[in-house]
Image (cartoon, helix red, strand yellow):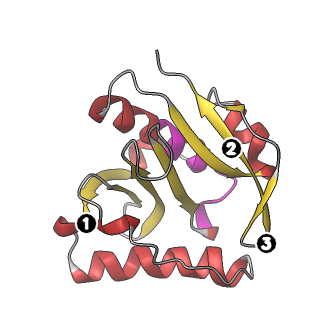
Amino acid sequence: MTDDNTIAWQVTRFNALDANQLYELLKLRVDVFVVEQACAYPELDGKDLLADTLHLTGRAQDGSLAAYARILAPGARFSNISFGRVVVTPLYRKTGLGHALVKKILDEAGRVWPGRDITIGAQTYLVDFYRCHGFVPVSAPYLEDGIAHIDMTRNQA
């Protein structure tokens, strides 16, 4: 189990990311979502640039990127808050860091947009993972970029 105290969390808007940070998070996203999952899709979708998009990074004690997620304002993808590009580096998988990452996402989303529900498009194999965090399915499964997904919502009220 990863001790959450060993991870340094930071929330940044796009215009505050420096070139090295941006490269590092985009490389991780491409390495996992495009290469590892063998899925050709438009990784650069314009949502990173939106003024209200939040980039959540978790860094190990040595400064390396261990986890990342993108939090989207209401209306950017769904009418509710949303998040995606949730990723943990291979070295930190199966340590509990994924759950810590989702908890940080929920905390930050609640701080910035209090009382707003959250809707995500989750890969179907992660339904039980997100259920642990209060999400419930709200759609039938569907294919997105060749991968089975399902919309899930967490009520914040």
Whether pointer 2 and pointer 1 mark residues with C-beta atoms closer than 8 Å, the reply is: no
Q: Is residue 145 above or below residue 52?
A: below
Name the residue nearer the viewer: 56 or 154.
154
Return the x and y of residue 6 as percentages of the image width and height. 41, 50
Q: What residue type is labelled 2?
A: Asp
| Side of 153 relative to 70 (left or right) | right
The kind of secondary structure element at disc 3 is: loop
Which residue: 70% across, 53% down? Answer: 94
Q: How far apart are marks 2 and 1 (CA)?
A: 26 Å
Mark positioned earlier in the residue sequence (1 or 3): 1
Task: For label 2, count other residues whose C-alpha is less than 10 Å away and answer few (under 14), some (14-19) or many (20+).
Answer: many
Q: Mark 2 points at which residue?
A: 151
Return the x and y of residue 58 as percentages of the image width and height. 40, 56
Return the x and y of residue 101 as percentages of the image width and height. 50, 46
Mark positioned earlier in the residue sequence (2 or 1): 1
Residues in magenta, as a range: 91-103
Whether pointer 1 and pointer 3 mark residues with C-beta atoms closer than 8 Å, the reply is: no
Q: Is residue 68 above or below residue 1?
A: below
Q: Mark 3 points at which residue?
A: 146
The kind of secondary structure element at disc 2 is: strand
Which residue: 47% across, 82% down? Answer: 27
Mark positioned earlier in the residue sequence (3 or 2): 3
Give the quadrant of residue 64.
bottom left
Q: How far apart are marks 3 and 2 (CA)?
A: 15 Å
Q: Name the residue under label 1.
A: 14
**Which quadrant holds the N terminus?**
top right
Count the labels in the image: 3
Whether pointer 3 and pointer 2 mark residues with C-beta atoms closer than 8 Å, the reply is: no
**Foreground tag (1 vs 3):** 3
**Foreground tag (2 vs 1):** 2
